[in-house]
Amino acid sequence: MAGTTDTDEESFYTSEEKNWAAIAHLSAFSGMIIPFGHILGPLIVWLVKRGDSELVGEEAKEALNCQISVTVYLLLCIPAAFIVIGGFLFGIILIMDFVLIIIAAIHAAKAESYSYPFIFRLIK
């Protein structure tokens, strides 16, 4: 469910775990500099930290699933651009991705579970 929170778990995790959980989401912004960085950032955090912390593993997996879904949605906009709506949808998807990454990072920094809406959960 979108925006689900578990505040009881907040005190259970260390500040380092919370920081890494937020970094897992924020690393998607590396796609602004590095090609496919929006996928590589969360993937690297997930691969490196998933064994160290359940929180970091879950948040990195959620961020990775989101960025894979966003990539699929953006690719689907390319053929739709020929009927004008694709360009509009492309912009909306990018804005929503930006906003949802920030919201997810804020929740992760508080050790609250966050589920992105409208994504495929390909990595379980």
Image: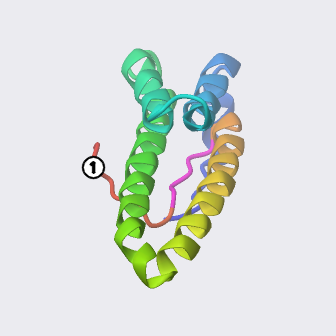
Q: Quadrant of residue 87?
A: bottom right
Q: Quadrant of residue 78?
A: bottom left
Residue at image coords 43%, 84%: 83
Main SS type for the magenta part? loop
Where is residue 60? Give x, y as percent.
47, 34
Q: Is residue 13 above or below residue 94?
A: above
At x 65%, y 52%, the residue is 98
Closer to the camera, 21 or 38?
38
Q: Specify whether 104 is left or right of 45.
A: right
Please tell me whether residue 35 belongs to the stretch shown in magenta: no
Residue 81 appears left or right of 20: left
In the displayed structure image, the side of residue 55 where residue 111 appears, left or right: right
Q: Secondary structure at mark 1?
A: loop
Q: Circle 1 is placed at which residue position?
A: 122
For image coordinates 56% across by 47% down, the residue present is: 113
Q: Position of residue 61 (x, y in %)?
A: 41, 38
Does 68 appear above or below 27? below
Magenta region, residue range: 112-116
Q: Residue at x 53, y 66 (%)?
A: 90
Q: Residues within 10 Å of mark 1 (few under 14, many from 20)?
A: few
